[in-house]
Image (cartoon, rainbow, N blue to C red):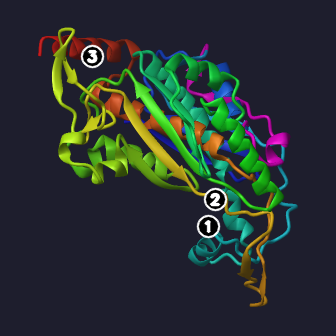
Amino acid sequence: MLRYLTAGESHGRGLLAILDGLPAGLKVDEEFINEELKARQAGYGRGGRMEIESDRVEIWAGTRGRVTLGSPLAILIRNKDFKIEELPPVTAPRPGHADLAGAQKYGHRDIRNVLERASARETAARVALGAIAQLFLKEFAVRVESWIVSLGDVSIGEVGEDEQAANLSSSLLNCPDPVAEKKMIEIIDRARENGDTLGGIFRVEAAGVPPGLGSYSQGESRLDARLASALMSIPAIKGVEIGLGYESARLPGSKVHDEIIRAGGTVRRLNNRAGGIEGGLSNGERIVIRGAMKPIPTLGRPLMTVDLETGEPVSAARERADVCALPAASVVGRAMVALELARAFLEKFGGDSLTEIKRNYSGYMKSLKRF
């Protein structure tokens, strides 16, 4: 079973993570991991912290010659902005953060003890682990990609696949539509001037996923439930849609369900309204999932709150923050989808080495051709 654990505070020494359950024999491309970490830090609208940190992964255990051993893989991402012991206490909880509920849960009088771990800085570790999951999935021609589809009230238009790839490579917002991106940058600038923040929606697609990942036998085994949970675990994500999502509730069944056809010697769906998942199982079509991110709750013009020490109304404390972190969320989103798909993949085709898993996978795919 693939499982992971992260540790570390926003202004602590760094972020630690352990990924257990990887098979032996997987080549670990550190530069690819670092590219994903860099993508998470990029994006128009990010805050001052991104000017300080330059995230790079250090692999501390689980490989030899940059090839996995089958033992737990341990990584470290160091923080340059390491000053947790010097930072002042926080007694005014910020609306929209974990501050107040976290302080109540753990009995902290200094809210910094909550916000340091609740910070989205932790997602850097998950992006690194997700990059490793992507490397594993690529061994089976499974590709996971992501981009933003709307920011504030601006949405992208129709973009061809080739044009999309070219546009994403030069985008400041991980946006495939340059016309929409220009408008998005303008509203980010306005929000910054007004001391406000913006959210939006990103899309993750996984191509090449074989049918049969997940299960309908138990609710917790359903792939759609697992992917939704993975995306909802990202800070500030407030909604998830798969395939048509909420639109399917407004349409008749004839316009929601995908007819099954035989094409090119295989049985497949005529459309992909289901987003690649039916009955909790991947169905062989491209998996399509969207995450809705709320605006970052730390505002340039802080909202009102109550100081827990004095009981008086005050403006919320303002930590260094972004105006819009949606491009980063799209990178974290593909990391989380990759981790969950890799977990489901290993459950289906499990083995102790990459060679053994490829043998199991090959046999299954051959059986599908005869199905």
Furthest residue in direction left, as rendered = 371
- Start-end of magenta stretch: 42-65
Sooner in the amino-acid sequence: mark 3 or mark 2 = 2
Q: Nearer the viewer, residue 286 or 317?
A: 286
Q: Quadrant of the C terminus?
A: top left
The quarter of the displayed image where residue 222 is located: top left
Q: Nearer the viewer, residue 224 or 340?
A: 224
**Element under disc 1:** loop
Task: Give residue 70's position: percent from left, percent from top.
Answer: 46, 24
Sooner in the amino-acid sequence: mark 3 or mark 1 = 1
Kind of residue at disc 1? Ala
Task: Give residue 291's position: percent from left, percent from top.
Answer: 49, 47
Kind of residue at disc 3? Asn
* Residue position for label 2: 118
Q: Quadrant of the N terminus?
A: top left
Label annotation for residue 363: none
Which residue is found at the position 74% from the left and 34% from the top? 55
Which residue is found at the position 70% from the left and 50% from the top? 324
* Residue position for label 1: 98
Q: CA distance from mark 3 to mark 2?
A: 40 Å
